Image (cartoon, rainbow, N blue to C red):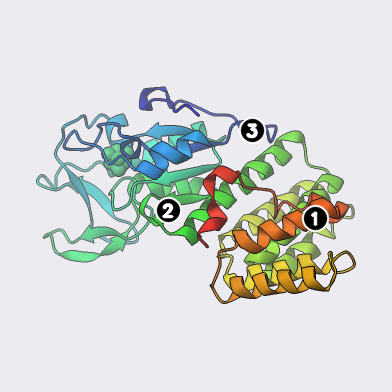
Amino acid sequence: MSTASTAQATSTSPPDTEAAPIRVGVSACLLGEQVRFDSGHKRDRFVADVLADYFELIPVCPEVAIGLGTPRPPIRLVGDPDSPRAVGTRDAGKDVTTDLADYGRTMARRLEGISGYILKSKSPSCGMERVKVYTDTGHPAGSGTGIYAAEIMRANPMLPVEEEGRLNDPVLRENFIGRLYAYHRWQCLMAEGITPEALVDFHTRHKLILMSHSPERLRELGRLVARAGSEPVEPLAEAYGEAFMATLRHRATRRRHTNVLQHLMGYLKGHLDGDDKAELLELIEDYRIGRVPLIVPVTLIKHHFRRHPEPYIDRQLYLHWQPAGLSLWNHI
Ligand code: SF4
């Protein structure tokens, strides 16, 4: 899928069908654009070569956008780590905090249709977390968030946001990409016009995904959605959407995936003979103890459901949400 250039990163509308491209904001230097202070880039192969095939990536360089140019003197964060300023490393009188924050708020409005954001780590503008903050005299003062990134995240706490380095971790990668797809589906649901029936159906399709992240929060979301039909649906959907995306931020652990696999097996019990049951149980156990990746028992379960279809499982996104080419479950 193509990427837009930084200069064209103007605006996006929310997607209205699940077939619409999934748009993701990206720090432009990660795509190889030579926008860094030293006129270089920080091209990330996974983002630029792999994710670009699945998502419409929208590159943005906030420092170039506010007119700092390339090459330019570097900036850094100084002051209170919870509310730092971005100033010139050599010329502390050059304070670009307000410009970066204003631009972040502007882009948060223009990019309201994106389903996620991939940020360059450690940057005083783009860093999501743990960016070095200094005292006025240049000593370490702690860590904080880049000025532009903070505004993007503040404007939409539901937006999936991740840094390029963390995407090398298979669990964080699967979590982030899962949230991208889930948020895209949520945006489409809201764009179509929410109804009590649509909200219940959305929840039903995501039950096993939610179970893999947090069975407790799945129950809370179930109680929330049970009020659909007896309460105004818009505020209920707003509360549901926030809780839904917060639940997906919980890591889906091996123990919770095992729980989902056993739950799925329960729907097959009446169809499998003794040998098939033993084989599936053994693979689930191999996964639980880390001997095989998740894709192994999932592939066998999908095979059995193809032979013995179950309407409820057919509607569950857990087995079907991810494109095979990304191989996300081959590594967790
Ligand atoms: S980290 Fe952000 S501000 Fe810095 S070069 Fe990359 S896109 Fe531009």
Q: Position of residue 227 (x, y in %)?
A: 84, 59
Of the residues tagged 2 and 1, which is closer to the observer? Answer: 1
- The disc at residue 15 is 3
- Residue 134 figure quarter: bottom left
Q: Nearer the viewer, residue 320 or 17?
A: 320
The secondary element bearing badge 2 is classed as: helix
- Neighbor class of circle 2 (other Cα within 10 Å; few <14, some 14-19, many 20+) is some
Q: Residue at x 63, y 41 (%)?
A: 184
At label 1, the amino acid type is Phe
Q: Position of residue 156 (x, y in %)?
A: 53, 47
Give the residue pinned by disc 2: 167
- Could you give the CA–CA distance between mark 1 and mark 3, rounded to whole angstroms? 31 Å
Q: Give the mark, 2 or 1, whose residue is nearer the N terminus.
A: 2
Q: Is mark 2 within 8 Å of ligand 1?
A: no
Give the residue pinned by disc 1: 305
At label 3, the amino acid type is Pro
Q: Give the mark, 1 or 3, whose residue is nearer the N terminus.
A: 3
